[in-house]
Amino acid sequence: MTKQIAIIGGGPAGLMAAEVLSAAGYSVTLYEAMPTFGRKFLLAGKSGLNITHSEEYQRFAGRFGAASARLLPALDAFTPEDVRRWAEGLGIETFVGTSGRVFPTAMKASPLLRSWLRRLEVQGVKLRTRHRWVGFADGGYRFETPDGGITLHPDATLLTLGGASWPRLGSDAAWVPWLQEMGITINEFQPANCGFDVDWSDTFRQRFEGAPVKSVSATSAAGTLQGEFVISKHGIEGSLVYAHSAALRDRLKRHGHANLAVDLAPGRSVERLERDLARQDAKASFANRLRKGAGLEGVKAALIRELVPQANQLPPQELAILMKGLPIPLLRPRPITEAISSAGGLDWSELDENYMLKAVPGLFAAGEMLDWEAPTGGYLLTACFSTGRAAAKGIENWLRTK
């Protein structure tokens, strides 16, 4: 008899596992609580779907923090180049952007998802939406469906239920207590790739909310990175902030305070800035001295005035040093419901090499519900694809031993 496999969660990890297992000849049913599949995947693609990254592979594989070593076998088996070839097999051409990120030529998620779902249907995968897993019951898995409650007893089950960010799209971490009741360790979910609160004055907020701060670099425990960020109603957000978010979040948690040091003039040295500022007429306005001596105006100049009100009284050397490392004091991360992704989740010690929960034979897990995090730039999706595929291979290995 054909083995029956249930995959619970219709995001990238679950879809990839369904593809691998159905291609191997198993009977696969994919259950999704929402009305459609891949809702967070589609949202990620609204501004251009970033499916992977083209940087040197060893560097790419080290982007997953403490979980990098544990993820490596899965990534080795489905590398960024494999992701591009897989997309091409779905009829989706990709290109490398100036940042090294890889995008579909169409810059949308919907064509890829439609092609992917068609492939699954052709391979015999049964797609079930509005089927919400609500826990364990009678030795099986209990679901709420449009036609009432059902309990399933598949030969193997894979959970790909996501983390705790964007709960309105389905990643609500409702599964946590059901696994904890079985003695399984779940590490606390925390926001990742998130913005931070800053105590802006009303005047600054009203004038600069939504303003981009371009062509800067920023330094934290994560290192020094170049890019841009945005002034938000609550504080700061954007790609450069997200790149530092794990380091900043962890420092806030340990010490209760953290600064993001921003270099407002990364193309100029302290010595040059000091020299150019010293040439300015001491009677000129502070705004004119910043503009003529350092090329700073608009939101960059306003940041200096906002964060260091006495900056106009500083001598050129101190002002130059300030411009090269303006500290933005952070209060807290934005709520996890706003974060692009989440850190925390199912502890790796609970899984064997097949991605099976040691405490529950026949139950596997993959994707963002596992405890790993990564920056934006294609790393998140590639790890979801790779762990979904690895868990599918793990299910095959386990079923062969039964």
Image (cartoon, helix red, strand yellow):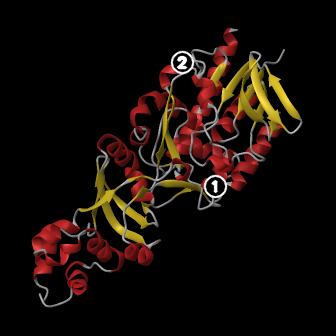
Tag count: 2
In the picture of the structure, the residue carrying the numbered disc 2 is: 352
Q: What element carries label 1?
A: helix
Q: Is mark 2 on a helix, strand or loop?
A: loop
Which residue is at 84% across, 14% downward? 1
The percent position of residue 334, horizontal first and vertical second, equals: 47, 53
Q: In which quarter of the image is the C terminus?
A: top right
Give the distance between the C-alpha atoms of the residues marked 1 and 2, in whole angstroms: 32 Å
Q: Is residue 306 left or right of residue 4?
A: left
The percent position of residue 215, horizontal first and vertical second, equals: 35, 68
Mark sitting earlier along the chain (1/2): 1
What amino acid is found at the position of numbered circle 2 in the picture? Asp
Which residue is at 14% across, 79% downward? 277
Whether residue 25 is visible: no
Which residue is at 39% across, 45% downward? 246
The percent position of residue 331, horizontal first and vertical second, equals: 36, 54
Residue 275 lies in quadrant: bottom left
The percent position of residue 363, horizontal first and vertical second, equals: 65, 21
| Above or below 359: residue 287 | below
Residue 380 marker = none
In the picture of the structure, the residue carrying the numbered disc 1 is: 43
Q: Is residue 252 left or right of residue 381?
A: left
Dot 1, how many residues are within 10 Å of its Cα: few (below 14), some (14-19), or many (20+)? some
Circle 1/circle 2 CB separation < 8 Å: no
In this view, which residue lies farthest toward the right?
A: 147
* Residue 344 vs residue 214, the one in the foreground: 344
* Residue 378 vs residue 270, the one in the foreground: 270
* Residue 302 vs residue 217, the one in the foreground: 302
Which residue is at 41% across, 58% downward? 197
Residue 32 lies in quadrant: top right
What amino acid is found at the position of numbered circle 1 in the picture? Leu
